[in-house]
Amino acid sequence: MLNQFSRTELLLGHDNMEKLKNARVAVFGIGGVGGFTVEALARSGVGTLDLIDDDRVCLTNINRQIIATRKTIGQYKVDAAKERILDINPDAVVNTYKIFFMPDTADAFDFSVYDYVVDAIDTVTGKIMLVEAAQKAGTPIISSMGAGNKLDPTAFEVADIYKTSVCPLAKVMRRELKKRGIRKLKVVYSKEKALTPIDDTANSCRSHCICPPGSARTCTQRRQIPGSTAFVPSVVGLIIAGEVIKDLTVH
């Protein structure tokens, strides 16, 4: 019987579609990267998605985040993403957590219940904790490296963290993971050197913060506001989704 996933089934087959339907994937960070990952996972038929992010949609998210529209400004990102997922697949199970993943919130999650974990957050402390928790539970994880301040979507590739170069975030992750005895981690990264954002105070969130009321962490708390585009973080998110789907199915 034809359904919304019929064209995918022509490539993956019925058995693999059943695997995706029965899979549970957690996506930490529902922003420019994570939002597109969630979108692709939902459109691929993943049956259960856990969405973790405590942020709200801001006007400045519209340039790159698939969940961000004029209509969703001010909504929690996980709520906006859940609504999209259920419009795509009403049978999906969507669990939302308005939580900023850090040491004091890590105990809220049982990583053994997930078939896959996606790290699309931008704090090193949180990323390392995610990797440690997932690997301790024996759950596959893929991590996004730096996507801000870059313009070339074709430069991104999938690699083990210890085979990366150029990316400053990947360098920090290599050092910290090595200290902790973690020997491997699948990542998506780019060798493109990051650009320096134009220093324009009239167009800076640091000078004119417009974060929605109730936002837990405003732009004024950040050391630097990275520049971004519609076509870089989206590509990273889709590459991640492709890796998750590939790893969850058998070809």
Image (cartoon, rainbow, N blue to C red):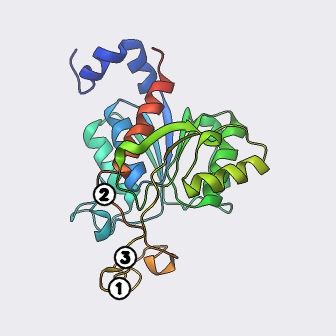
- What type is the residue that disc 2 sits on? Arg
Please state which of residues 33 and 150 is positioned toward the viewer in this rendering.
150
Q: Name the residue under label 3.
A: 211
Q: Which mark is residue 33?
A: none
Tag 3 secondary structure? loop
Dot 2 and dot 1 residues touching (CB under 8 Å): no
Q: Residues within 10 Å of mark 3 (few under 14, many from 20)?
A: many
Q: In the image, what residue occupies the spot 42% across and 54% down?
A: 30
| 21 relative to 114, above or below | above
Q: Residues within 10 Å of mark 1 (few under 14, many from 20)?
A: few
- What type is the residue that disc 1 sits on? Thr
Residue 167, image x and y in percent?
54, 53
Question: What is the spatial separation of the Cα atoms under label 1 and label 3, in whole angstroms?
Answer: 16 Å
In the image, 17: left or right of 130? left
Location of residue 38 by image quarter: top left
Query: Sequence order check: which comes first, mark 2 or mark 1?
Result: 2
Q: Name the residue under label 1.
A: 201
Q: Which of marks 2 and 1 is in front?
A: 1
Please state which of residues 56 and 204 is positioned toward the viewer in this rendering.
204
Q: In the image, what residue occupies the spot 38% across and 86% down?
A: 207
Query: Sequence order check: which comes first, mark 3 or mark 2?
Result: 2
Query: Sequence order check: which comes first, mark 1 or mark 3?
Result: 1
Q: Mark 2 points at which residue?
A: 64
